[in-house]
Image (spheres, rainbow, N blue to C red):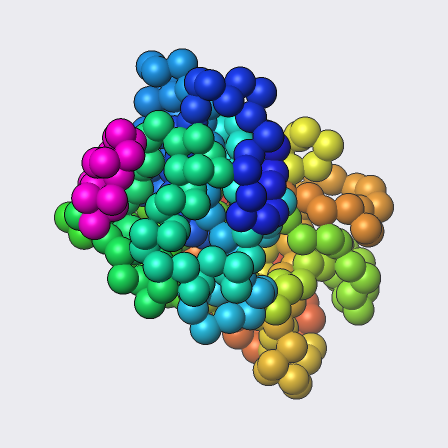
Amino acid sequence: MQIISQFAPLPLAQPEKGTAVAMGFFDGIHIGHRAVIESAVQWAKEHDAAPAVFTFKLPMVNKMKGKRLLSTADKHALIASLGVEYYLTPDFEEIKGLTPEQFVLGIVRDCNARALVCGENFTFGAKAAGNPELLRTLCAPLGVEVIVVPMAQFEEKPVSSTRIRTALEGGDIPAANAMLGMPYAIRFEVQHGAGLGHTLGVPTINQLYPEGFQLPRSGIYITRTRIGGVWYPSATGLGSRPTVNDDATKVTCETFIPGFSGDLYGTDPVVEFHAYLSPSKKFDTLDELRACINNAAKRAQEYFV
């Protein structure tokens, strides 16, 4: 997949064949986002065109969209896995002042678009003035087909990144995973911690959520961790470690991987979340903390049998 970071013409291998362009922010690549992208890929396949995605970049911390569910690298990898060949992602500042007419003409021109695909809640142009109905009106004289994909549903309500964030905040991992269409996962670099896990005989990998990422509910989770292509059942504690830490603002994500030994510092293993076990609590003794970690690890091993 070729990534173009400006609102500029795509370097199409065969310009005469044109493209089918999926449009949206696609922040979580959830089942609704995937339906839009897959519709563009399918249209391109049926009409001998190139599948493309148009989105935009925002600062890590911003007021326009919610907190991040995916890293940029993981977002790219997921979209590429759906069969997209061209990925156009200018900064939002570059496109925010365009009128709906300028926006559509720009995409059709730069992408040599033959079809534009969006969700039914898609907006575009300055002050989000454009909607799918206007998109059809603007594309008709250009001979560009418009495909509007219905919003995906979960429990009889539309799927959205906001609902996924709410599910994570509540520890409702099954709901978050159902709407994502895959397990919620993190892939952050392993950093040095206080070494308490080694002292207790339950060594953990320590990963810190970057600023701007959505945090799930604090507590203990059944997870599984991928190391070198191998998946290991694991138990993850997310929170301020109240037993050994008095600073409630210092949140860590620590994962115990029973049966694995090795140095993972500086690597970025994938940790998938599968079930919420219990809230974080302050134990009276380190022995109680060790027993809690071992119990969570046992439940993780049983979960993945």
Quadrant of the image occupied by residue 201: bottom right
At a point 60% along the width and 41% down the height, the residue shown is 4
Q: Residue 142 colored magenta?
A: yes
Quadrant position of the N terminus in the picture: top right
Q: Is residue 113 visible?
A: yes
On whether residue 189 falls in the magenta region, the answer is no
Instruction: Give the residue at x 62% y 63%.
Output: 209
Is residue 222 visible in the rendered image? The answer is no
Residue at the limit of the structure toward the front, as seen here: 141
Q: Nearer the viewer, residue 110 or 269?
A: 110
In this rendering, the answer to whether 20 lies above or below 243 is above
Residue 133: percent from the left, percent from the top? 17, 47
Apparent side of residue 130 relative to residue 241 in the rendered image (left or right): left
33, above or below 47, in the image: below
State the image coordinates of residue 53 (x, y, percent, origin top left): 46, 38
Q: Is residue 246 above or below residue 89?
A: below
**Residue 279 location, x and y as percent?**
46, 68
Please state if 153 lies on the left or on the right of 19 as rendered.
left
User: What is the residue that sits farthest to the bottom in this orientation?
Assistant: 246
Residue at screen point 55% across, 52% down: 90
What's drawn in magenta, residue-wise? 134-153
- Residue at x 32% of width, y 55% of height: 100
| In the depicted structure, whether residue 63 falls above or below residue 233 | below
